[in-house]
């Protein structure tokens, strides 16, 4: 499995503010979008393009345009929604699917409550979820997308725990992970340490 840690200073700076418990929801939302824009550059570096002939004011030349079929992006509800707009701003033509998962607080197992995916056969899919903790949610969402026979899947998160990386590696060794940071460990409640707390609650102001 390939693991990409996007440790650009701009990303690390924004992540530091996200981690800070004093950061308000509006700032948290804005910084998430900015950080995910930078992460998405890394995760889509090899997006399919096709050549296109254009006329500059000076001469004819060949450039590229994003090729077909357009990628699919799948945020895991709810917190993955905070990452969606950054990707649709970069790729306005993407198709969007949704997977709703909620971790059971006691067992830490993901409970599925929603799934709406476009046809994924033969297409490139980005799965978005900011927190890869035990890896249960990321792995379950990846399995759900795989049922449709995609050409490839890439998993984009903001913070990953070693436990979640190991789970993804065991269940989906073919799926590269793009993250802004690898944190130390999980605590007894399954939260990432040092982490940034409950991403969904901080994003939506529901703490
Ligand atoms: C969070 C997060 C991931 C999951 C990660 O979602 O957004 O989906 O926990 O944990 P895991 O790797 O141990 O599965 P949560 O279940 O809190 O739901 P929410 O996004 O609706 O807040
Ligand atoms: N989900 C979160 O939102 N934060 C964590 O630290 C772990 C799971």
Image (cartoon, rainbow, N blue to C red):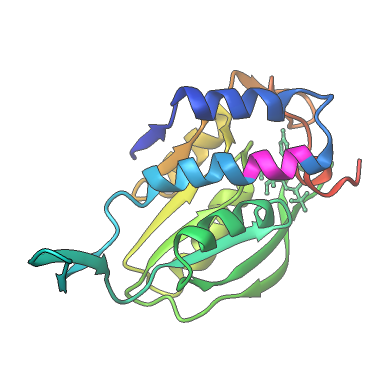
Name the residue located 43 percent from the left edge and 75 percent from the top edge: 120
Q: Which quadrant would residue 13 be assigned to in this image?
A: top right
Q: x, y (%) of residue 80?
A: 65, 53
Name the residue located 53 percent from the left edge and 63 percent from the top edge: 88
Is 52 or 77 nearer to us in this picture? 52
Q: Residue furthest front?
A: 57
Which quarter of the image is occupied by the N terminus? Answer: top left
The answer to whether 105 is drawn above or below residue 73 in the figure is above
Q: x, y (%) of residue 9?
A: 48, 22
Q: x, y (%) of residue 138?
A: 57, 50
Q: x, y (%) of residue 40?
A: 45, 48
Q: Is residue 82 visible?
A: yes
The answer to whether 131 is drawn above or below residue 109 in the figure is above
Specify whether residue 101 is painted magenta.
Answer: no
The answer to whether 78 is drawn above or below residue 53 in the figure is above
Magenta region? 27-32
Name the residue located 25 percent from the left edge and 64 percent from the top edge: 48
Which quarter of the image is occupied by the C terminus? Answer: top right
Specify whether residue 31 is painted magenta.
Answer: yes
Name the residue located 76 percent from the left edge and 38 percent from the top edge: 27
């Amino acid at each position: 499995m390939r693991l990409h840690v996007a440790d650009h200073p701009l990303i690390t700076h924004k992540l530091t503010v996200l981690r800070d418990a004093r950061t308000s929801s509006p700032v948290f939302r804005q910084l998430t979008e900015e950080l995910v824009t930078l992460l998405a550059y890394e995760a889509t570096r090899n997006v399919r393009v096709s050549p296109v002939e254009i006329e500059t004011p000076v001469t004819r030349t060949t450039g590229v345009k994003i090729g077909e079929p357009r990628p699919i992006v799948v945020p895991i509800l709810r917190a993955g929604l905070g990452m969606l707009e950054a990707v649709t701003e970069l790729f306005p033509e993407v198709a969007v699917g949704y997977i709703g998962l909620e971790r059971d607080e006691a067992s830490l197992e993901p409970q599925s409550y929603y799934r709406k995916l476009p046809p994924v056969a033969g297409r490139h899919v980005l799965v978005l979820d900011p927190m890869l903790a035990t890896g249960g949610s990321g792995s379950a969402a990846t399995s759900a997308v795989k049922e449709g026979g995609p050409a490839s899947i890439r998993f984009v998160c903001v913070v990953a725990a070693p436990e979640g990386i190991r789970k993804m590696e065991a269940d989906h060794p073919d799926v590269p992970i793009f993250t802004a940071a690898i944190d130390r460990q999980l605590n007894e409640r399954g939260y990432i340490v040092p982490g940034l707390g409950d991403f969904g609650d901080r994003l939506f102001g529901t703490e």
